[in-house]
Image: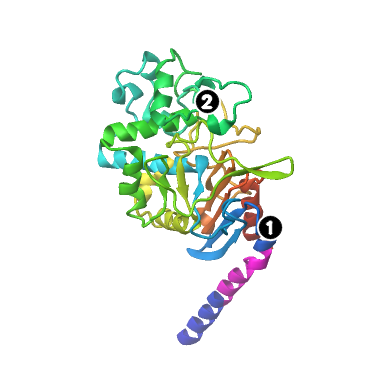
């Protein structure tokens, strides 16, 4: 009788597993979302879906640039833009784990020369976008009319800090409101440099990329390193593609300067899933939404937002989600993780006419919506 019961239970479990597996979409269903990107002479995208810790879908579309027409592949490195922020946050969290930084340390504790308005701003405020720092893009000198964006001198993280030091106040008192801040993440990169005693990019290599064998992922610094297997950004202008790879803000590392590939980001996703760099408890602040006193955070498009440290946390169709998008001249990226569903979706585009987030959510619908 016991043997029979065990057999029946085993059969039920097998059937449940089979049914669960059959509920997942086919590769053809996922591929149909990106079918329009197939090309031998246009920029495109790289797409990765990870389900239950395994690669469920991996496809590449288009070319890295219009000069070589090299095909995009899993090793092609794209500029992540603001998807970089999860790595900057992790660098800070590693220093907190080391005891060299604390979330409640103040900006002026690290940079004593910073004006008095920085005294209430904490590391936590910088991480969760409640610092009130002004946008450095608004503080930069404006270029002469008609000058191409790729001919404008680039600003670096240290330059962002210097611009902020020239101000006498922030946009609002620290902690009062939520306001997405590229300035805050540039300052965090400078904090990592100051506290660790080494360049930000070197710290990322030593503490994140090398331990995870992300061999081709780098914080790109022109003249100091090179991006291997590099994709160049493009924009469509007057029905023609134009390379639009760099802008005046492209050299700022902390808010968007990392290049990476599907191959390396699969390793990053695995490390997050297995808590390789930070324990589950150490990651908790990163996945806890900030709740500022002056109301609900909102995305620029007016939809509700939730943010931790380097991750948006607003759910999707009631599914728990940690995610981030990146948008910069010529690139669109998104990294979506649904931890309870054991589903991750990564879309990297080297063309500005695509919405990587919308594409990723179309894929998510195939997996998460009842079929």
Q: Secondary structure at mark 2?
A: helix
Q: Is residue 289 magenta?
A: no
Residue 218 at x, y percent in the picture: 40, 47
Q: Residue at x 62, y 55 (%)?
A: 364
Residue at 37 percent of width and 15 percent of height? 115
- Give percent across and percent down for residue 129: 48, 30
Residue 125 percent location from the top left of the image? 42, 29
User: Does dot 1 land on a helix, a strand or a loop?
Assistant: helix
Residue pointed to by mark 2: 137
Q: Could you tell me if the residues under marks 2 and 1 are in contact, i.e. CB atoms within 8 Å?
A: no
Mark 2 vs mark 1: give the one in front: 2
Instruction: Report the magenta residues as a range.
Output: 15-29
Q: Is residue 224 visible?
A: yes
**Left or right of residue 279: residue 132:** right
Separation (CA) of disc 2 from disc 1: 35 Å
Tag shown at residue 269: none
Task: Name the chief secondary structure element in magenta.
Answer: helix
Mark number, residue 33: 1
Q: Is residue 164 above or below residue 322?
A: above
On whether residue 22 falls in the magenta region, the answer is yes
> Toward which corner of the image does residue 86 lie, by quadrant?
top left
Residue 287 position by quadrant? top left
Q: Position of residue 34 (x, y in %)?
A: 67, 57
**Colouring scheme applied when the structure was drawn:** rainbow
């Amino acid at each position: 009788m016991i043997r029979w019961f065990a057999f029946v239970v085993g059969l039920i479990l097998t059937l449940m597993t089979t049914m669960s597996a059959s509920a997942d979409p086919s590769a053809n269903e996922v591929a149909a979302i990106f079918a329009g990107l197939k090309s031998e002479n246009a920029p495109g995208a790289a797409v990765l879906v990870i389900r239950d810790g395994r690669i469920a879908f991996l496809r590449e579309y288009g070319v890295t640039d219009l000069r070589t027409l090299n095909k995009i592949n899993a090793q092609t490195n794209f500029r992540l833009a603001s998807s970089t922020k999860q790595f900057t946050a992790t660098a800070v969290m590693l220093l907190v784990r080391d005891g060299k930084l604390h979330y409640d340390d103040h900006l002026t504790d690290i940079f004593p020369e910073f004006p008095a308005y920085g005294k209430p701003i904490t590391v936590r405020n910088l991480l969760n976008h409640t610092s009130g720092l002004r946008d450095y893009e608004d503080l930069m000198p404006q270029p002469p009319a008609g000058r191409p964006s790729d001919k404008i001198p680039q600003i670096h993280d240290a330059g962002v800090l210097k611009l902020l030091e020239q101000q006498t106040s922030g946009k609002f008192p620290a902690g009062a409101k939520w306001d997405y801040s590229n300035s805050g993440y540039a300052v965090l990169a400078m904090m990592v440099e100051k506290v660790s005693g080494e360049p930000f990019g070197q710290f990322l290599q030593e503490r994140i990329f090398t331990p995870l064998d992300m061999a081709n992922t780098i914080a790109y610094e022109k003249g100091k390193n090179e991006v291997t297997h590099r994709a160049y950004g493009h924009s469509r202008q007057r029905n023609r593609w134009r390379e639009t790879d760099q802008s005046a803000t492209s050299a700022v590392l902390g808010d968007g300067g990392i290049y990476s590939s599907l191959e390396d980001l699969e390793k990053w996703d695995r490390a997050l899933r297995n808590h390789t760099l930070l324990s589950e408890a150490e990651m908790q602040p990163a996945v806890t939404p900030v709740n500022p006193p002056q109301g609900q955070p909102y995305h620029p498009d007016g939809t509700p937002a939730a943010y931790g440290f380097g991750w948006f946390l607003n759910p999707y169709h009631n599914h728990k989600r940690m995610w981030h998008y990146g948008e910069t001249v010529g690139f669109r990226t998104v990294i979506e993780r649904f931890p309870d569903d054991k589903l991750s979706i990564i879309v990297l585009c080297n063309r500005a006419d695509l919405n990587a987030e919308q594409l990723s959510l179309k894929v998510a619908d195939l997996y998460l919506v009842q079929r």
